[in-house]
Image (cartoon, helix red, strand yellow):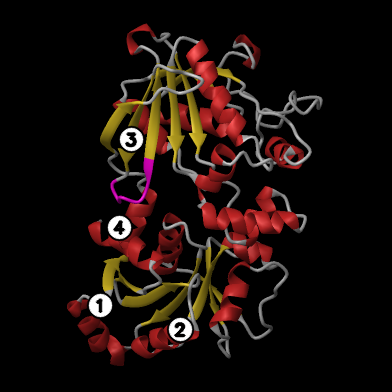
Amino acid sequence: MRQAERAIFDLRRGLPILLRHPGREILVQAVEGLDDKALAALQSLSGAPARLVLSEHRMAALGHRDAGETVSLDLSPLPGAASLRDLAWKRGVRLPATATSTPGADAERAALRLLGRAQLVPAAIACDVAPGRADAVAAEVASGELLAVSTETALRLCESGPGGLARISEARVPLAEAEDSRFVLFREADGIHEHVAIVIGDTSRWPEAVPVRLHSSCLTGDLFGSLRCDCGEQLRRGVAAINAMGGGVLLYLSQEGRGIGLANKLRAYGLQDEGLDTIDADQVIGFSKDERDFRVAHEMLEQLGIHQVMLLTNNPSKVEALQHAGINVVARQAIYGEVTTQNQRYLRTKANRHGHWLHELLNEQGEPASADPECLPAPDVATKL
């Protein structure tokens, strides 16, 4: 598992890694940051032509639906690095007529999972190691120049969630909306992501069902007050609401852009400026409509000793994720930001395509297709902000 965690850092640095599968070795490198020199070096080391590996979401954006979770593309002649980047995330491009595709195997799936974990565009260059180059590749591994990891280990890491969260540090941090607040920092096992629990009020006086909000980080909205979303307002109103209820916890999760990272979120913003909504923009660059893993929230609540919550959210997925993990969500309260000219389309997409409970805020009739789970009281049991 440790090698797989190191592989994420090497991919982020623009280095190739070696994935080992029974009867097969494959060199992979991220398309993001790739240049022609690195592409030539990868093919020279492997002794085999390079293939482009894309996700099903990117393939759909290229006009090829139902392609499978991962797809391996043989592009002959192989284009240069700049053209490969266009095929990986540019809007409006098409695959060459000569391209042939095959379903990706476990190694290709592991490559894209690792890239997603690294918050890079899920597009890889892959080269099978030719028999005549096996010794040269083994020498690179032995010298420490090339990191090798088994496909099985890589997949296990990416499918296991955050792993064991470590509680690292904490301190009192008075907030404008809640003076009696304490920040508790948790770090994921791979060392990449850190999450903060904002513990509000005296824990001995908390309600039996602890008010909790899961808030994914949003640099543009939370810090700079971006008008493209309502995240900053939801954050501050969430803290104020929890304080007014007698205390609870806001989990500030390192899941920028619904889990795709800031770089990809900005790419998606550029596509939204061309007319796409948030879901379609994320698909163009290869992602699903939501890449977040709320298992980390469950682990944080477990470590804080919280097992019964009143959840402040408009998102059915958060309710379902906590319930599935064994957290007793006994009630839900809406938490709204302001509707503005700039964020109205974003909010409507969340309501109509993500199923968020926002139709009342947007003055529309009816609820989205996803209704409150049957085990919850109706949303109006809790006072709405």
The picture places residue 226, in percent across and down from the top left corner, at: 64, 42
The residue to which callout 4 is attached is 5
Q: Nearer the viewer, mark 3 or mark 1?
A: 3
Which element type, helix, strand or loop, lies under badge 2?
helix
The residue to which callout 3 is attached is 185
Label 2, label 3: how many angstroms apart (C-alpha)? Answer: 40 Å
Residue 62 sits above or below residue 190 on the image: below
The answer to whether marks 3 and 1 mark residues whose Cβ atoms lie closer than 8 Å is: no
Which quadrant holds the N terminus? bottom left
The residue to which callout 2 is attached is 39
Which element type, helix, strand or loop, lies under badge 1?
loop
Label 4, label 1: how many angstroms apart (C-alpha)? Answer: 16 Å
Label 3, label 1: how many angstroms apart (C-alpha)? Answer: 34 Å
Tell me if mark 2 has few (under 14), some (14-19) or many (20+) residues whose alpha carbon lies within 10 angstroms of its own.
some
Which stretch did the figure color magenta? 189-194
The residue to which callout 1 is attached is 145
The picture places residue 308, in percent across and down from the top left corner, at: 41, 17
Tell me if mark 4 has few (under 14), some (14-19) or many (20+) residues whose alpha carbon lies within 10 angstroms of its own.
many
The three-letter amino acid code for the residue at tag 1 is Glu
Q: Earlier in the sequence, mark 4 or mark 1?
A: 4
Q: Residue at x 37, y 77 (%)?
A: 27
Is 192 one of the magenta-colored residues? yes
The answer to whether marks 4 and 3 mark residues whose Cβ atoms lie closer than 8 Å is: no
Q: Residue at x 20, y 84 (%)?
A: 139
Residue 338 sits above or below residue 177 on the image: below
Q: Main secondary structure of the magenta part?
A: loop
The picture places residue 196, in percent across and down from the top left corner, at: 38, 34
Which element type, helix, strand or loop, lies under badge 4?
helix
